[in-house]
């Protein structure tokens, strides 16, 4: 089956099961079902950030800004069935890796079809990250005292404004999954910034429901994507993205 046909089936499965999936996650944040189709059997561990992105280095880790704790990428997983993980999303990633390897941004650019698949891939990362934050408890902020009641609250409840309610967190999750069922990403193309990079290392940062930046050093390409914000032009998005990236890199070295 071709990738496009697999993606059609993927969207159909999400549309059919999205209510049950989100209801199950809300009822039990650690529910053991496929987070894409709701199946409870043939489950696998889907890496939130694919292993090929960081060259399968088991020492790679990221720090959650909410509680300042670190976690290795290779152990950061969510449940997904074999079909969604290996067959559908695995095929999408294999296609993208092939395109990343073939395209030299100094000489050519991705096709419209490529761009829409890149956007879909970045949107799956956002959804997985939101699910992950519901499955992980705050525990305690590094350097501070553990408070039992607060420590048992999911990290997701502390993302965003202080007055963000659980209903808003669940609404974001619901919309994030629904977005994956939308075929056309035309209206979001200006929200994706594609950058040629010479940096020698992988880099990643993310703001829930806002944006993601992921730098793939092995392919000399980086992507900045605004999940919700839309722009009249790609230049407008690039200008805003560059400011955010500059601030992030500056804070990382201080």
Image: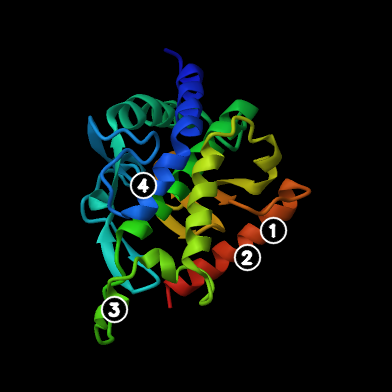
Q: Which residue is mark 3?
A: 149
Q: What is the CA distance from the residue labelled 4 to the residue labelled 1?
A: 40 Å
Q: Residue furthest right?
A: 232
Q: Which residue is mark 1?
A: 239
Q: How is the image coloured?
A: rainbow
- The answer to whether the residues at label 4 and label 2 have Cβ atoms under 8 Å apart is no
Q: Give the percent coordinates (x, y) of residue 102.
A: 48, 27
Q: What crowding class fits label 1: few (fewer than 14 Cα within 10 Å), some (14-19), or many (20 or more)? A: few
Q: Which residue is mark 4?
A: 24
Q: Which residue is mark 2?
A: 243
Please state which of residues 85 and 49 is positioned toward the viewer in this rendering.
85
Please state which of residues 252 and 135 is positioned toward the viewer in this rendering.
135
Q: Give the percent coordinates (x, y) of residue 2.
A: 45, 14
Q: What crowding class fits label 3: few (fewer than 14 Cα within 10 Å), some (14-19), or many (20 or more)? A: few
- Which is more foreground, mark 4 or mark 1? 4
Q: What is the CA distance from the residue labelled 3 to the residue labelled 4?
A: 23 Å
Q: Which mark is residue 83?
A: none
Q: What is the CA distance from the residue labelled 4 to the residue labelled 2?
A: 39 Å
Q: What is the CA distance from the residue labelled 3 to the residue labelled 1?
A: 42 Å
**Could you say whether the residue bearing mark 2 is in a helix, strand or loop?**
helix
């Amino acid at each position: 089956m071709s990738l496009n046909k697999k993606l059609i089936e993927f969207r159909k499965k999400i549309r059919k099961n999205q209510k049950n999936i989100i209801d199950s996650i809300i009822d039990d944040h650690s529910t053991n079902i496929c987070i894409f189709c709701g199946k409870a059997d043939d489950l696998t561990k889907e890496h939130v950030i694919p292993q090929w992105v960081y060259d399968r280095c088991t020492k790679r880790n990221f720090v959650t800004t909410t509680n300042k704790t670190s976690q290795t990428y290779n152990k950061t997983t969510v449940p997904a069935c074999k079909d969604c993980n290996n067959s559908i999303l695995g095929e999408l990633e294999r296609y993208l890796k092939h395109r990343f390897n073939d395209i030299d941004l100094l000489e050519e650019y991705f096709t419209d079809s490529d761009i829409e698949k890149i956007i879909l891939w970045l949107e799956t990362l956002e959804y997985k990250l939101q699910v992950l934050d519901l499955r992980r408890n705050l525990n305690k902020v590094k350097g501070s005292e553990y408070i039992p009641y607060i420590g048992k609250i999911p990290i997701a409840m502390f993302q965003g404004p202080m007055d963000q309610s659980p209903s808003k967190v669940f609404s974001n999750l619901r919309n994030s999954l629904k977005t994956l069922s939308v075929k056309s990403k035309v209206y979001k193309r200006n929200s994706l910034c594609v950058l040629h990079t010479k940096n020698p290392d992988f880099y990643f940062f993310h703001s829930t429901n806002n944006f993601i930046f992921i730098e793939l050093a092995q392919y000399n390409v980086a992507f900045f994507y605004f999940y919700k914000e839309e722009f009249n032009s790609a230049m407008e998005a690039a200008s805003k993205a560059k400011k955010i990236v500059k601030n992030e890199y500056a804070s990382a070295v201080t």
